[in-house]
Image (cartoon, rainbow, N blue to C red):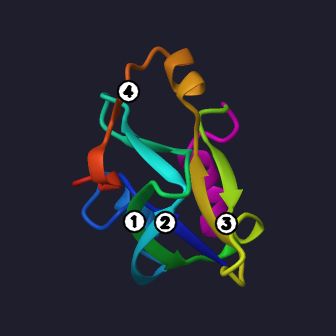
Amino acid sequence: MKVIVYGTLKKGGLFSGYMEDSEYVKDVVVTGFKMYDSKVGYPFVVESKEDECIQGEEYKIDSETLKKLDIVEGTQSGLYKRLDLKEVKKKIKEPTYIYVSTLDRMTGFGLKPAEVKGGFWKV
């Protein structure tokens, strides 16, 4: 299975250590998402129009890493949900996860996000 990371989990990011036992595959552009700056040190992405995109890194991961990422991304608290791109994009042949949120969810946590033009988070 794979995961696409786009913020603090990327190489050089604050939480990149969680990816150290995983195999980096390549830099990727993923359409259908828009990126926002949370204004508290990390980005988040939301599902969007197909002509919008974000940039990230793709990694091969194991089930233990996936469990750790669920914790780091706050899936239990509802901050993010894990989305399998295989279920929404026909070209993807194996489970490939990305963590997404919504503007309502993030503003509900008291954040005041701003759109990241170009969908690229600089670590």
Are the residues flagged by discs 2 and 4 in contact, CB closer than 8 Å? no
For the point 46% across and 62% down, the residue is 5
Q: Main secondary structure of the magenta part?
A: helix
Residue 33 screen position, x and y as percent: 51, 52
In this orientation, which residue lies closer to the viewer: 75 or 81? 81
Mark 2 sits on what residue? 30
Q: For the residues labelled 3 and 2, say whether their Cβ atoms are less than 8 Å apart.
A: yes
Could you tell me how far apart the alpha carbons at marks 2 and 4 are, in whole angstroms?
Answer: 20 Å
Indicate which label's residue lies in the foreground, 1 or 2: 2
Q: Reading the chain from its start, which is encountered first: label 1 or label 3?
A: 1
Q: Which residues are magenta?
A: 64-77
How far is disc 1 from disc 2 in space, using C-alphas? 8 Å
- Which residue has dot 1 on it? 56
Residue type (three-letter) at the residue carrying disc 2:
Val
Q: What residue is pinned by disc 4?
A: 113
Q: Are marks 1 and 2 in contact (CB under 8 Å)?
A: yes
Q: Is residue 95 above or below residue 38?
A: below
123 and 56: which is toward the camera: 56
**How far across and down, in percent of the image, does residue 32 sit?**
55, 56
Q: Amino acid at mark 1?
A: Gly
Q: Position of residue 107 (x, y in %)?
A: 50, 19
Find disc 3 in the rendering and name its residue.
85
